[in-house]
Amino acid sequence: MSTPEINEIAHEQALDAQKGMKASVQSEERLMQYAALKQEMDALDLEIKALGVFIAADLQARGIDKMQSEWGTFSVVEIPRWEYSEAVAHLDDLLKDAREKERIEGIAKKRSTTSLRFQST
């Protein structure tokens, strides 16, 4: 199902809701469709990551950091990861403890959002 089709379905569902019609979120068809799309996304994500590793290695082997194509720009970028000293790690532990204490004492304010979590079987 393409993105425009999904957008059209979502728009129709929103209109139904506005008219007071109750759309059944629990319908088997919607659950099945969601699960199938999620599995497709996960498979595509793995494929994209594998291709990305290959493409980045190929570009680096050719000494290219950035390549323009008809599909877009492919860039090899560095993503920094920091390793801190023991002193900073200790401060981080103290901060975690202080946060936990505020949660327990009710000082910290909890803010939550609602989302759907799905795990395939």
Image (cartoon, rainbow, N blue to C red):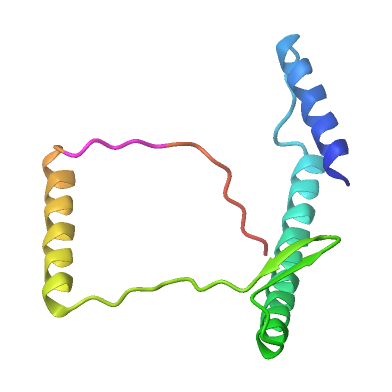
User: In the drawing, does residue 61 fall left or right of residue 115?
Assistant: right
Give the percent coordinates (x, y) of residue 32: 79, 49
Highlighted range, magenta: 108-112
Instruction: Kindly give the residue lying farthest to the bottom in the view shown.
Output: 61
Residue 64 location, quadrant: bottom right
Instruction: Kindly give the residue lying farthest to the top in the view shown.
Output: 19
Residue in the picture at 76% in, 14% down: 21
Residue 71 location, quadrant: bottom right
Q: Nearer the viewer, residue 90 or 110?
A: 90
Q: Magenta segment, principal secondary structure?
A: loop
Residue 19 part of the magenta-drawn span = no
Residue 110 part of the magenta-drawn span = yes
Residue in the picture at 68% in, 90% down: 61
Q: Nearer the viewer, residue 120 or 70?
A: 70
Give the percent coordinates (x, y) of residue 29: 82, 42
Residue in the picture at 78% in, 40% down: 30
Give the percent coordinates (x, y) of residue 17: 72, 17
The correct choice, above or below, for 46 with respect to 15 in the image is below
Residue in the picture at 82% in, 42% down: 3
Image quarter where the C terminus lies is bottom right
The correct choice, above or below, for 31 with respect to 82 in the image is above
